[in-house]
């Protein structure tokens, strides 16, 4: 893949998880090369979050995006002063507004610090899974791996993914519809825009490949007071809520996996949005959000 295609997420923006073997239930992965304020520098990020909703909540959940489902959202229990209690599994958009089910929980580690992600025990037990290393396997299917847990170099979770077929079995059993939001970003700093692989690119905002796309280019001096150029691409949500500021290309996508006894599980519904943006003095960055 050439550098321009890499930066522009040419392959990734056409991909959807509705027909993928592995579905990312929760992710926050960052890879970098170099120092962010200097040339050369590269960065790529992938994040995702999800929740499952009953038919009665689907019309509302279809409007949810990155801010509502992404890994920045806390998945924690809550006790209210009026005596009500919301278990960690329950997805709430507003207080005392149970709408759905979280499949991965975020567990802040008291005193020692850090976070651990925990797969919903109901999902593990209903699929009859056991833990082997960083995977959850199903002994009754020759110990096939059903869920994979990935960690960053600090030892914290960066991705939990599940096999699509087993996920659809679980959704069908509970009559739930899965909503995923995910985001991709890529960034690169280059010394000169005109002589770089990205010469000729201009700032745009457009709908592309079913999503909102934006390209931004600006000088490193504008960003950090340093020489060089920064190429940026970014995404906004379909809800038109403002995305966290990022440099690089961003893509927004939402995915609905619907599995009920009377629904064809091989053709789950999906939709996604994407944005890209760019500026001079080149830093390159891209994200995909769903």
Image (spheres, rainbow, N blue to C red):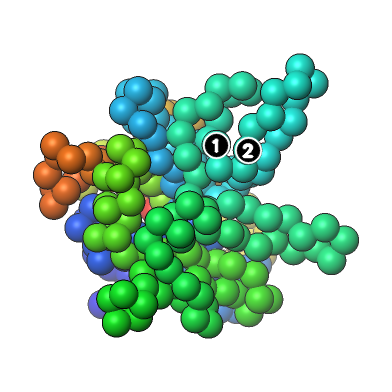
Q: Position of residue 247 (x, y in %)?
A: 52, 54
Cα–Cα gap, marks 1 and 2: 6 Å
Please name the residue that numbered disc 2 is placed on: 87
Q: Position of residue 67 (x, y in %)?
A: 52, 38
- The image shows residue 17, relative to residue 261, as above or below, that is below
Q: Position of residue 68 (x, y in %)?
A: 51, 36
Residue 254 appears left or right of 115: left
CB of mark 1 within 8 Å of CB of mark 2?
A: yes
Is residue 7 visible in this depiction of the protein? Answer: no
Residue 221 appears left or right of 93: right
Please name the residue that numbered disc 1 is placed on: 90
Q: Please report the residue visible at 48 percent of the width from the left and 52 percent of the height from the top.
A: 122
Residue occupying the far right of the picture: 111
Q: Tell me, for residue 246, which label it has, or none.
A: none
Work out which quarter of the rendered image holds the N terminus and state it: bottom left
Total residue callouts: 2
Residue 220 appears left or right of 181: right
Is residue 99 visible in this depiction of the protein? Answer: yes
Residue 213 appears left or right of 165: right
Q: Position of residue 137 (x, y in %)?
A: 40, 75
Q: Please report the residue visible at 27 percent of the width from the left and 45 percent of the height from the top.
A: 172
Q: Secondary structure at mark 1?
A: strand
- The image shows residue 290, relative to residue 282, as above or below, that is above
Q: Residues within 10 Å of mark 2 (few under 14, many from 20)?
A: few
Q: Nearer the viewer, residue 288 or 96?
A: 96
- The image shows residue 140, relative to residue 59, as above or below, that is below
Q: Secondary structure at mark 2?
A: loop
Q: Please report the residue visible at 53 percent of the width from the left and 82 percent of the height from the top.
A: 133
Q: Residues within 10 Å of mark 1 (few under 14, many from 20)?
A: many
Q: Please report the residue visible at 36 percent of the width from the left and 77 percent of the height from the top.
A: 139
**Residue 39's image quarter?**
bottom right
Q: Nearer the viewer, residue 285 or 198?
A: 285
């Amino acid at each position: 893949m050439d550098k321009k295609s890499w930066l522009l997420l040419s392959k990734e923006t056409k991909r959807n998880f509705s027909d993928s073997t592995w579905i990312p239930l929760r992710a926050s992965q960052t890879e970098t090369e170099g120092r962010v304020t200097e040339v050369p520098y590269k960065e790529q990020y992938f994040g995702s979050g999800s929740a499952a909703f009953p038919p009665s909540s689907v019309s509302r959940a279809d409007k949810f995006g990155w801010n509502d489902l992404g890994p920045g959202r806390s998945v924690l229990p809550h006790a209210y002063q009026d005596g009500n209690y919301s278990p960690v599994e329950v997805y709430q958009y507003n207080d005392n507004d149970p709408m759905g089910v979280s499949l991965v929980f975020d567990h802040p580690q008291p005193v020692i610090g850090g976070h651990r992600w925990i797969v919903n025990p109901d999902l593990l037990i209903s699929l009859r899974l056991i833990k082997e290393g960083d995977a959850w396997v199903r002994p009754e299917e020759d110990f096939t791996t059903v869920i994979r847990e990935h960690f960053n170099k600090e030892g914290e979770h960066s991705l939990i993914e599940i096999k699509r077929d087993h996920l659809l079995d679980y959704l069908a059993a509970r009559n739930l519809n899965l909503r995923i939001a995910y985001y991709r970003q890529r960034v690169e700093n280059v010394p000169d825009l005109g002589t770089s692989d990205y010469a000729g690119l201009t700032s745009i905002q457009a709908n592309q490949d079913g999503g909102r796309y934006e390209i931004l280019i600006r000088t490193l001096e504008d960003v950090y007071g340093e020489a060089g150029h920064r190429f940026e691409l970014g995404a906004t949500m379909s809800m038109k809520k403002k995305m966290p500021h990022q440099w690089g290309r961003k893509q927004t996508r939402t995915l609905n996996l619907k599995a009920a006894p009377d629904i064809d599980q091989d053709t789950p519904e999906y939709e996604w949005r994407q944005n890209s943006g760019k500026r001079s003095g080149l830093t390159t960055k891209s994200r995909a959000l769903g």
